[in-house]
Image (cartoon, coloured by chain):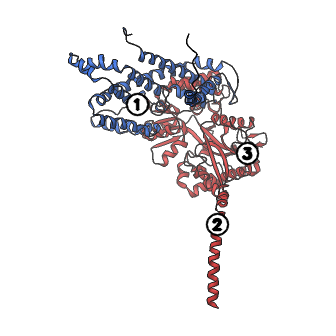
Amino acid sequence: MSAPRRLNLYALTWRLPIILWQLMFFVGPVLFMVAISFFVVRNYRMTEAFEFVNWEKMLTRGYFWDSYWYTLFIASLSASVAMLVAFPAAWALAFRASDNLRRWAVFLLVIPFFTSYLVRTFSWYVILAESGVLNAMLGYIGLGPFKMLNTHFGTVVGYLTLTLPLAVILQTVTMANIDKTLIEAARNLGCKPLATIWRVVLPLSRTGFIVAALFCFILAFGDFVAPFYLGGSQEPTLPILILDTTKSGQQWPRAAVVAIMMMLTLFTVAFTAIALAYRKPAGSR
Amino acid sequence: MVKSTKTQSNHYLRRDVLRIGGGVALAAPFVGRAWAETTEINMLAWYGHGEPDMVGAFEEANNVKFVPKYYAGGDNMLALIAQSPPGTYDIILSDAEFVQQLNAAEYIEPLDANDYPFDDMLHEDFTKFPGHWDGDTLYSMILRGGHLGVSYNTTAMSAEEASSYQGFWKPELAGKVGHFDWHLPSLGMMSLKNGNGAGLWDLSDAQWEAVQETTMSLRPQVGGYFDYGGTFNGLKNGEMLAMCGIGDWITGVLERDGAPVASVIPKEGGIQFTESYCIGRGSGKADLVKSFIQYMMSPEGQVKSAQMLAYPGFCVTKAGRAMLQEVDPKEAARSHQMDGMANDPIALINEGRIHYRDIPQQQSLEDWNDFWSEYKNA
């Protein structure tokens, strides 16, 4: 029988601020959001109640599920694209670039975050419009014009604006920490480059890559700006549905239902991803 | 003697300078405080109404400062008031169709009709505007209006094609028709297209069903749903060649900049948005607000409203319209506020082609909004 653990006041003192912070600004608001999902709106005023009408209303509407599956799809797609597009750049930075160049590259990748995401999104108008820069360039080689704004493509471009630098940074940091001798050993034993990536680099980077993909998914899943301004709000994603719901009739309780569904989805995806990331390979102890 | 006087004079001058300088230095904090005592007027309005081009001259003349809170949509406005303590907003700019609800919820003060130029209205409807009165008591003062119809890029649609809502279904416009993301004007237009005329808001179940079918048939043409900024950009950069749910209030701003866009009232009729001022219940600055409303109803105020940078609207008083024609004939002509012009807003009302925007009579706003969400997802 072990002795009861003594309360470590010193450790508690240092932990208390973050515990209080989380209670006040995360747990508290989430509980409040759950509570208001049972409230009702009468004459544009939210009234305390405990009714399931908002849950019933939202979860039985076809447009809610259309938005739900579309958001899930487009966020997954953009996370996958971000991971694929980021990989060559991250590979080069991790294995080919000098330490100095890598530091500069990471710094340059952080720079876009210095400006507002909304401003970065609006700047795509100039590039993606039918009369924009990209179509003008394609026109020189006899292609286009292509419709890129107000399409799924526009939405994904917006999401990538948000997630791609992050994906490159996380992949770079992950791969830079791989023991290079393992890669050299694989090559020496006759493993071809692509097989080396598949059998050595990716398994060793699994945790970092899954975390990077998870971040990309979370950011895209909750983003309002890209689907609204570059996707033309068609089809509406869940964040747009939240806005629509609050705008018309001020149905904050119904918006809370949508938000809770989003959170439940993100929790499920996050826990699954983390479990995958830290799962031990078969046969290991 | 002269020298002595001069010396004495210099002496007094130095002393005066020191005294005045010291006085100024000591009084500076109080002077600053006096300047800071500008009266703040809290305004709840659509975007643009609290900007310097609208309120700047009044602020300067009356030592007041408008603090605007902007909303987008009537129910958004109602919610903001509902969630604020009484007296939060001194002046409320409301769409006419929501004034009754403001009054029913006792959010606004009654007005004295004698304070305002009802004898100078451009149209008799404006003197007793629907919803603004409760019996003989006035609750809201009409300020301006605007007409919604077919807005289009003149290089992509002819005036003849734009003369009917059917123009939105033009095959060449596939993916190029945009919607202002508010169900009320867009569905109102679909109701007009279905021939519901003056009964466009009072739809039976069968008529509502038909409006939904008509709207759904437009879906393949739709290239996006936009807020004000998105609508503006879409038309400006040519991504959208026609817009449903708007009118001159957006194309007028682009037209002023030389963009090839226009808005017309089609043969099925158009919708009028009407903006009016109310005094917030519990406001401690009702007299100042009344002065401001009187100023905006004066010819000078009406001209400012017609020229408003955010979005134009037409004058509702004869004197205002006359002054606009005098001081800004270009804008008066652009907005057809000239007697004898084809699309003169007052002539359109007289011809019965304009229907005042309202809320659904037989369905709830929620029903309309639900369908709007389905439509966007289709």
Identify residue type, mark 1.
Leu
Which residue, given by chain and number where applicable, does mark 1 sit on? A166
Chain A image colour? blue
Chain letter belonging to callout 3: B
Circle 1 Cα neighbour tier, 10 Å, few/some/many (<14 / 14–19 / ≥20): many
Residue nearer the viewer, B264 or B239? B239
Q: Position of residue B148 (x, y in %)?
A: 57, 38
Q: Position of residue B92 (x, y in %)?
A: 67, 43
Q: Say if labels 1 and 2 share a chain.
A: no
| Gap in angstroms between the C-alphas marked 1 and 2 | 58 Å
Which residue, given by chain and number where applicable, does mark 3 sit on? B283
Which residue, given by chain and number where applicable, does mark 2 sit on? B24
**Comparing marks 1 and 3, which lies closer to the viewer?**
1
Please give the name of the residue rendered at 65% of the width and 55% of the height, measured from the top-left corner.
B36
| Gap in angstroms between the C-alphas marked 1 and 3 | 50 Å
Q: Is residue B257 left or right of residue B344?
A: left
Identify residue type, mark 3.
Ser
**Chain letter of the red region:** B
